[in-house]
Image (cartoon, coloured by chain):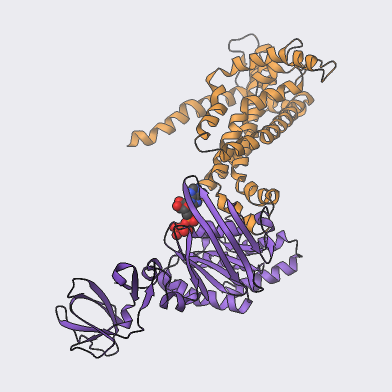
Amino acid sequence: MRLVIALPYAWLGIFFLLPFGLVLAIALGSAAPDSAPPVTLGLSLKNFALLLSDDLYVAAWLGSLRIAATSTLAALLLGYPMAYAIARADPRWRPILLMAVILPFWTSFLIRVYAWMGLLASNGLVNQFLRWSGLVGDPGTILGTEWAIHLGIVYAYLPFMVLPLYAALEKLDGGLLEAAADLGANPVVAFLTVTLPLSLPGIVAGCLLVFIPAVGEFVIPDLLGGTGTLMIGKVLWDEFFLNADWPLAAAVAVCLLLLLLGPIALFQRQQARSLERP
Amino acid sequence: MTAAAIVTLTGLAKRFGSVTAVERVDLEIRRGELFALLGGSGCGKTTLLRMIAGFETPDQGRILIDGQDMTGVPPHRRPVNMMFQSYALFPHMDVAANVGYGLRRDGLPAPEIARRVGEALKQVRLGDLGERRPAQLSGGQRQRVALARALVKRPKLLLLDEPLAALDRKLREATRFELVRLQEELGLTFVMVTHDQEEAMSMASRLAVMDKGRIEQVGPPHEVYERPASRFVADFIGIANILPLDGGRAWLALRPEKIALFAARPDTDHAEQGRIVDIAYEGDRSLYRVGLLDGSLLQVSTANTARIAAAFRRGDDVWLGWAADAGHRLDK
Ligand SMILES: Nc1ncnc2c1ncn2[C@@H]1O[C@H](COP(=O)(O)OP(=O)(O)OP(=O)(O)O)[C@@H](O)[C@H]1O
Ligand SMILES: [Mg+2]
């Protein structure tokens, strides 16, 4: 019994607190390029001060937040109708449709992002189609732009948007929509006054589940975005591997965690509340 | 269509796959009446109500409301409000917002809405609960919120699907009078679905008895009780002894309270001899089952006007007597 209770704490201690302590300790030290590992421990806040004062880092932070926010919005606009359609579908079809949403997870994330590189390259399938259809004269290259990053994030995280939305919409009592219609609401008004507010928990959960990982996303901006892309995950990578400035990279990681603490806490509270009031 | 009709149903029919829910129903509901649709479970009462409200499309037939053909008119454009069996209160709105929902859809100004919501809540005696959420109410309070929400728009026609079914017996009986009072005070037309014949008899000005999707009989409660149109109706409404007539081609419906018990042969128009098989004491009355000489059973009820009633005991030989006009002849 004690063991069962101790297990999650041990897990948290070994896989979260311990590494986080290490990262924090490194962040407070300073770079020592000639030693291995390239860190001298200390108690200095200069790495954090640099992050806040250097325009490059601030721009990267803001860029991450902006791209994560617009991608989350796009995922919501795409995911809501999908979740709605699945929740309204014949009950026999729902498991199959849900399966289709989750199916991409069966292949590696990295491989799917590489596949997008092929699709979006200047001679990729997407451009070939655009040229063939004559919709766009010269489509340019999508790969390496912010469009490609958005596309990648929406594609990769859409299931995290659809599933909580589906859970909220599927619970919705159809009788409430009938009551709204009976009281004079046309279908659009009934949607806005009943369906939308009652699916709000799903909207909040879905948005946070997309937004939180998207802020720190590294693979997608690195592979699909151009060299000029400023997202904090990419900055972290560059500091660590290219500049071998471990303390600065660690400071970025700590800041990222602190920044996401707000949304994560919001998500937790929201989950707790929806458990209380089903 | 008569001038007084607010709803006219002609040849209305609805099937769900192989199930016929409603079959060729012709019915007129008059302005200002409290009309009850009565019938057993699954006989099509809810389906009929949902077709009037516009939630189901009839396969055949027409619905006129106030002289207007409702074919193709969506629910939100019908001059009808419905009180749902499950109440269907909006869980994310407080009581006042629930009640005011329909008025906001009509685009009334906010002060007017607040005034009418307050008025409606007072009518159903919920004056001070406007800020509660439905989850914070008792079953009886929820029922009254649902009623207020449907009443507040002053619809030409209010449809109520088993409005009292979810209440306990005491509350149900008190609420019956409340509903009738509101209906009369506001001068509205109510169509109420119920499977409780006592409820229908005590509340309705007229009622329809349904069986297997068809309407068996329509009329005021006393007429349906005293002159049932068929054996089904006689049996469904109250208790009836059904005796074969004319060698089994017709029947006589004889209510238990129309038969009297005697110790010796009475000089009533009809008299039969029998023995008491059992007695069900129900407080205000006792129901006797009497076995006749030919083996058939008749039910007789007597009012317990004296405190110590038991004039007859189980096993006693008794005489049953009734007047020539006590029964009602049934041809089907
Ligand atoms: N949406 C539906 N799909 C399939 N069958 C249905 C549907 N709605 C009703 N039915 C069937 O139609 C018949 C009539 O149903 P209805 O709900 O009108 O009965 P009811 O008289 O209201 O019964 P109750 O007193 O139990 O509420 C039933 O056999 C029912 O199973
Ligand atoms: Mg019903």
From the viewer's side, name the closer residue of B202 and A254: B202
Identity of the residue furthest to the right in this view: A137
* Left or right placement of residue B312 versus residue B200 in this view: left
Q: Quadrant of residue B151 in the image? A: bottom right
Residue occupying the point 54% across, 46% down: A274
Chain identifier, colour purple: B
Q: Nearer the viewer, residue A3 or B326?
A: B326
- Residue B6 screen position, x and y as percent: 64, 69
| Residue B284 seen in the current view | no
Q: Which of B158 and B88 is in front in this view?
A: B158
Name above or below for residue B253 compared with residue A271.
below
Picture layout, residue A63 above or below residue B269: above
Residue A189 visible here: yes
Q: Which of the 4 image quarters holds residue B264?
A: bottom left
Which of the image's four quarters has the N terminus of chain A? top left
Q: Residue A148 at what x, y percent from top left?
A: 73, 21
**Left or right of A189: which side holds A111?**
left
Quick one: which chain is orange?
A: A
The residue at the point 52 percent across, 34 percent down is A94
Q: Nearer the viewer, residue A271 or B305?
A: B305
- Is residue B81 shown left or right of residue B253? right
* Residue B62 place in picture, x, y as percent: 62, 58
Q: How many marks?
A: 0
Furthest residue in direction front, as rendered: B246
Query: In the displayed structure, does residue B177 sit left or right of residue B270?
Result: right
Relative to A187, does residue A22 appear above or below in the rendering?
above
Q: Indicate the position of residue B271 as horizontal and vertical percent values.
A: 24, 84
Residue at 53% x, 38% y is: A90
